[in-house]
Image (tube, rainbow, N blue to C red):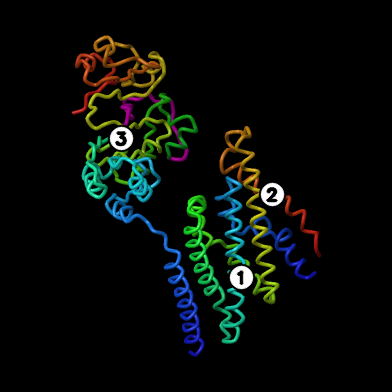
Amino acid sequence: MESILLSILTMGAIGLFFSAVISVAYQKLKVEVDPRVEKITDILPGANCGACGFPGCANYAEAIVQGAPINKCSVGGMAVAELIGEIMGIAPEDVVRKVARVLCQGDNEKAVWAGEYMGIPSCAAANLAGGAGKLCNYGCLGFGDCEKACPFGAIKVNARGLAEVDENICTGCGLCVQACPRNVISLEPIDKRVLVLCVSKDPGKISKSSCKVACIGCGLCVKKSPEGIALENNLAKIIDVEKINDESIEKCPTGAIRKLE
Amino acid sequence: MEYLVIFISALLINNFVLSYFLGICPFVGVSNKIDSALSMGFAVTFVMTLAAIVSWGVYNLVLVPYKLEFLEIVSFILIIASLVQLVEMFIRKTSPTLYQALGIYLPLITTNCAILGVALLAVLKGYAFVETVVFAFGAGLGFTLAIVMMAGIREELDGADIPSPFKGPGITFITAGILALTFMGFSGLIR
């Protein structure tokens, strides 16, 4: 009994002594921090996703006080930018909301299968092993590395084995873009509604035989809207959404170009 | 002479990083540049020596008289945590650049097992006060030596053509292993 009491007292005394020393030192060695940094840190969503280009929300708050643009937070969007603007005394410019888009339509039915992958169920592992069994070397692997990376539950592998983004939940943080070993996911402005949903750079013959919905680089779409689309590495590339003729989308033989609703 | 033996032994023969494998986290984490490695080494040496002195005092003047030796680990951790807080505040005040460079590894000195190891080993070996100071200082310098050597090698490795499977952590661990092997050569220095 006595030793219990004694230990409590001793540890308490040691603890008190050091806390006293630390609190004195804290007063003496206090570093003045701009109070705005703390306020902005409180306003930021705290997701620490890194979409703004800084390691975390606290770092971004520090950078804002030193003059970084206030509209980089895609998670908080306009609302957060306005609140930060109030603190900093500047009007926010428009935050262009970006969302992740999966640029692949080669689901389990539409892709052509070469074999079966029996390894670790992860996209990164399957990519190292040469793919998940689909003949296409560019498309979605469907093991959901992006799903695991998403802190908001916005991207999911659907029943057909293809990653799918819910654009209402997606904050455009870009973590899935980094997680995807095949770079199938890309961040696009939400108002860009015409997309080439394929990233295959294979020549038309090969991409045609490996997936029913691949961009085969035929160039029909380019003919219909030469100022809106260009052909690059056997792949249609959108230059200007405004100048895309609807015919381009309709004429695509594989349906690789899509207009989103 | 006896102090010299303790010093050399802690510095080289029983180097805390390369023979006891304590304090590996900052050893790998902060060894990409010689500058920050040196600062880290000195910060650790400082905390280590101070922690050993204070914990020697607490152990011999408080715990032993009251027969509370079983509290050594708890009280030592408390001491180390407090000291690290002090050092952190001090560095933050005096050198913000160094504070940025050390980053998360500075508060992590708290959980650096090498520091707790020094304090515990000094008690285990029954060192007197001066012996404890020499032992802790030697161990700290040994840590500095190891981390600076590692940083020097890693700076050279940045320009080397490393096969891609070994890039990054791979080559770092291999380097650490080879360094540890070379330090085994000291094992016959003092009987």
Provide the residue designation for mark 2: B179
Query: Amino acid under label 1?
Result: Ala
Q: Which residues are magenta?
A: A100-121
Between A42 and A210, the residue placed more toward the observer is A42
Q: Residues within 10 Å of mark 3 (few under 14, many from 20)?
A: many
Q: Nearer the viewer, mark 2 or mark 1?
A: 1
Residue A240 image position (x, y, % from top left): 26, 20
Q: Is residue A206 left or right of residue A167?
A: right
Q: Provide residue B52's location: percent of width, then percent of height.
A: 61, 70
Q: Chain of mark 2?
A: B
Main SS class of the magenta portion in the image: loop
Residue under circle 3?
A100
In the rendered view of the protein, which quadrant contains the C terminus of chain A?
top left
Residue type marked 3: Ala
Using the numbered discs, state the Cα–Cα distance from disc 1 to disc 3 in whole angstroms.
54 Å
Above or below, B188 against A221 in this view is below
Which circle's residue, 2 or 1, is located before the other in the chain?
A: 1
Image check: A112 left or right of A128? left
Report how many numbered discs are placed on residues in the image. 3
Q: In the rendered structure, are the residues bearing label 3 and label 2 in contact, judged by CB atoms less than 8 Å apart?
A: no
